[in-house]
Amino acid sequence: MKIGFIGLGTLGTAMAQRVMSLGYEVVGFNRSPAKAAALADAGLQQAATVDAVCAADIVLSVLLDDAAVQEVLVDGFPFCDNPAAIHVSVSTISVPLVHDLARLHAEQDQAFVSAPVFGRPDNIHAANAVIAVGGALEAITRCHEVLASFGNVTVIGSDPGAANAVKIAGNFLMASAVQSLREALSLAEAAGGDRQQFIDIVTTALFPTSFYERFGGLLAAQGGNAPAINPFANSARLIAQTSLDLSVATPLADALASALDHPIT
């Protein structure tokens, strides 16, 4: 079985390394060729085009956002020439865009699965990420072995968009935690408290989780405007848009994007 990767950023690279370590033949494409070239010594076959990757048996797209998916996958639809390929979208993208991808594949009678990941590269290497999966059962069965090599596969349902809604909902909780940490740290510090001491209290008495420990530690060390919050600001915008797409009232999500976009003073 040949596994293809479209997008070899931080997460895509970890996933490619993981499947190569298990003996799979792997081909990959990245818009910045250097990232694919960096994996050549580990056995990755560098593809010059997206179409070349789509010749693989299972193709995982690991792209940054809606704009990247639209540009790389939707415009021109590179899967047309290989009806046997199964496309697994790992990207955290909007529900309407997932439905567009599903429709394009259905028109070509091609298998499509959405499988956004809860986890970081270290979770991928340790095979303890959580993958939320949506799509036809037959298609999920075909790619289950590969997805399970990254961690726990949780089937959300037959609608691929539902998997992305679950991932976005999870991101909502993480972004909310980051913003509440920013504000709480600001409050404690204004009264003369020590940031790290406050985080130690929070992660011991209130939220003894790896997420609070990691991001609380970063905010304690770098302050409430640490660069680590930037991805959560981007997530907050997708969260707010998803609530509109699904006609769900989420007043906190609406305020979250604005709050994360503004510096803590």
Image (cartoon, rainbow, N blue to C red):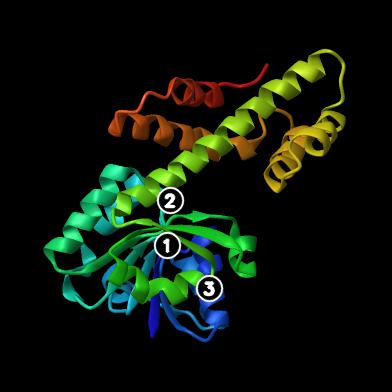
Q: Which of marks 2 and 1 is nearer the N terminus?
A: 1
Q: Is mark 3 on a helix, strand or loop?
A: loop
Classify mark 3: residues with Cα within 10 Å, few (<14), some (14-19) or many (20+): some
Q: Which of marks 3 and 1 is nearer the N terminus?
A: 1
Classify mark 1: residues with Cα within 10 Å, few (<14), some (14-19) or many (20+): many
Q: Which residue lies furthest to the top in this view?
A: 191
Tag shown at residue 149 = 3
Classify mark 2: residues with Cα within 10 Å, few (<14), some (14-19) or many (20+): some
Query: Going by the image, does 196 lie left or right of 212?
Result: right
* Mark closer to the observer (3, 1): 3
Query: Going by the image, does 176 lie left or right of 4?
Result: right
Q: How far apart are marks 3 and 2 (CA)?
A: 22 Å
Give percent across and percent down for residue 170: 51, 42
Residue at position x 44%, y 80% from top? 26
Give percent across and percent down for residue 224: 69, 27
Q: Is residue 220 above or below residue 184?
A: below
Mark 2 touches mark 1? (CB < 8 Å): yes
Give percent across and percent down for residue 255: 48, 20
Q: Distance between the residues labelled 2 and 1?
A: 8 Å
Where is mark 2, residue-wise? Answer: 64
Residue at position x 68%, y 28% from top? 181
Amino acid of disc 3: Ser
> The N terminus is located in which quarter?
bottom left
Where is mark 1, residue-wise? Answer: 7
Give percent across and percent down for residue 27: 41, 78
Query: Going by the image, does 151 lie left or right of 46?
Result: right
Amino acid of disc 1: Gly
Quarter assignment of residue 243 = top left
Amino acid of disc 2: Leu
* Mark closer to the observer (3, 2): 3
Residue at position x 44%, y 55% from top? 116
